[in-house]
Image (cartoon, rainbow, N blue to C red):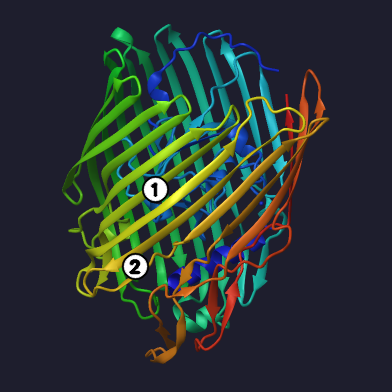
Amino acid sequence: MKTTLLISSLLAISASANAEEVTPPLLPEVTIQAQRSPDQVSKSVLSGKQARHIAGTSGDPLKALQSLPGVVSSNSGRPAVRGSGPQDNAYYVDDLPIGKIFHVGGISVFNADLIRDFNLYSAAFPPHYGNVTGAVIDVALREPRRDKLGGKLNVNLLGADALIEAPINDNQAFYFAARRSYIDLLIKQVEQKGITVQIPNYADYQGKYVAQLNDNHKLTLHAQGAADTLKLNIGASSNLAKQDPILAGNLALSDHFNMQAASLDSVLFNAAANKLAVEHIASGFTTRVGGAGNISVAVDDVMLRERIIFPVAEQHELAIGSNLVRSKIDINADIKNTTCTQFNPNCNFTNAPNVRLLDSFVSQAIDGSLQDRWHVHPALTLVTGVRYSYEDYLRRSYTEPRLGVEYQASPQTLYTAGWGRHNQMPTGQEISRNFGNPNLAHLRAEHSVLGITQQLDTAWSIKAESYYKKLSNLTVDSPTLNYINAGSGRAYGLEMLLKKDIAQAQSGDVTGWLSVSLAKSTRRNDLTGASFRYALDQPVNATWVANMQLEDGWSVGSKWQVHSGAPYTPINGSLGVYPNGGNIPNYGAINSGTLPTFHQLDVRLQREAVKKPAYTLNYYVELNNVYQHKNVIGYSYDPTYTTKEPIYPFVLPLSFGVQAEF
């Protein structure tokens, strides 16, 4: 698709400019069972400590997602899971919904040292999670330290961050972390093929305050935020401007979010666990695209969340959850409306109609979930559930069942199965007045999954899963209604994860994993009957991650990835000339082309250089794409669409970082 190639080009250019002793706690703690789910169906778990040492991530734990089975990386750097797109995922932090966990380029918005672990639910996730058709990424941030004042300072090639934390008294503690990129302060702009890039920048912060009110109640205050800015100038002589003249000029993208929340964890009668939370998120974005116009959107969300887990009987528990969300949306848009979708590759801005919209409205949504987890037999657990949701903008409600089975055949062998129905609201452009169709229905998905996990010994384990995902009500562009629900799709595959995990690695110990995925994902235009490969379809995907602990505080790690080439839509010359003089591209069948096979080796060397009673000093060096293989992520065409050039992702050949901790 032309828009996909445009975005890929801009991101690639933008990336090239961005040349990326335990003390017992003093406070009594409440053990809240609801904080981390015991559900095992289609779930992958990685600790923050383990994920921080993976080669090629620059110490960013969430980049480890792309080394797990079923996860592929899009050109935006955000993860896509099992035949769905990055926009089809739901993100949670400390059991609170959060809309943004990645900066431009796929860098996570968190201080790496704060991530305790994350759960990835790849399919048929529990009913208390929100409405999406893809996957759920559930991040847990650690508690503040409770022994003394402490902090950390990190500096790497892309940015710098600082963390401070301390107890306030015997029952209270806090931390606050902040980060900013600084390359834009050193290099103002670069020019490449008629496009001038002002170096993008990002910033984020996280704060947490914990108060142990008494033996049964804990109050936590949360604060998080992030922002990104990207500016380009597309010269009139560039190929992009010659293909789509209205793109010539300044292109500016910026977005932000700020979240504040208060949550109360309580132990109630009969060991019931309750979590009550109030959350506020202010987010928005502003975009200006050359002469095509501009759009600004601001969203203010207030959420009330409640979830209680209580025992019905021995080995039998019930979880009840509910959410109430009030959203105020302000839109100011005057821009060309390109109603292109994955079913239509032609996204020409110059010839699209101009649309104006000045709108402000309030929307509300409510949902409720019920999950019953029952050990009907010492070896067999049944997990049944249902989710009801309603939103008043499209006036749509859905009641969706979920089912999970966990069979512990032996202490070493676990069988799992899951099934569930899911829905997801279309994008804002697709449902807004003037730009979209406010009468659309939600996207729908049905997930089915079977799995087996085998513990081979104390260190080695292997996990295999097969899945099938059926998609319906996908949005297709329409000449009269802008968009209609007339698309479908399916995704299926087989995944394997072979893992070696040692609780306390000693010198010479090797840990890591091998993940292999065999997958297929397709889309179908139900109006025409045409089927094609999904844009992120990668039939074979394998990743090997290894880390070895050496002597004197040294460790070395490596990551090797290989996957089938993703599909793309070829352009075979032109069909004529637009009224503005630009050539009309002659698109081939959607996603009928295939990019070359992708493969890359990254190596990481890390050392704890200084370890004193008062402070420690660590550093790492990474060699990325060691053998300098030129991976292709797409093609750009000349103005007549007769010749094409490969687009390569920018990869820092060398990355390094230093951390001081006290």
At label 1, the amino acid type is: Ser
Expressed as whole percent of the image width and height from the top left, the position of residue 287 reads 44, 61
Query: In the image, 455: left or right of 531?
Result: right
Residue 539 lies, with reference to residue 408, above or below; the image says below
Q: N-terminal of the two: label 2 or label 1?
A: 2
Residue marked by disc 2: 341
Indicate left or right for 451 with 526 as reference: right
Quadrant housing the N terminus: bottom left
- Pick the front one: 322 or 348: 322
Residue at the image point whose x is 70% and y is 34% from the top: 153
Q: CA distance from mark 2 to mark 1?
A: 29 Å
97 or 404, nearer to the observer = 404
Q: Which mark is residue 466?
A: 1
Question: Is 288 positioned to the left or the right of 175 in the image?
Answer: left
Instruction: Tell me what residue is drawn at x 38 percent, y 30 percent.
Output: 39
Q: Position of residue 590 (x, y in %)?
A: 38, 75
- Helix, strand or loop for disc 1: strand
Disc 2 on helix, strand or loop? loop
Q: For the image shown, how many numbered marks are present on the structure?
A: 2
Quadrant of residue 612 in the image? top right
Residue 380 in sight = yes
Task: From the viewer's side, name the closer residue of 468 and 312.
Answer: 468
Q: Residues within 10 Å of mark 2 (few under 14, many from 20)?
A: some
* Residue 250 image offset from top left, x and y in percent: 52, 69
* Left or right position of 425 against 99: left
Residue 653 is situated, as x and y percent measured from the top left of the image, at: 73, 57
Say which amino acid is labelled 2.
Thr
Against 556, residue 567 (above or below) is below
Which is closer to the viewer, label 2 or label 1? 1
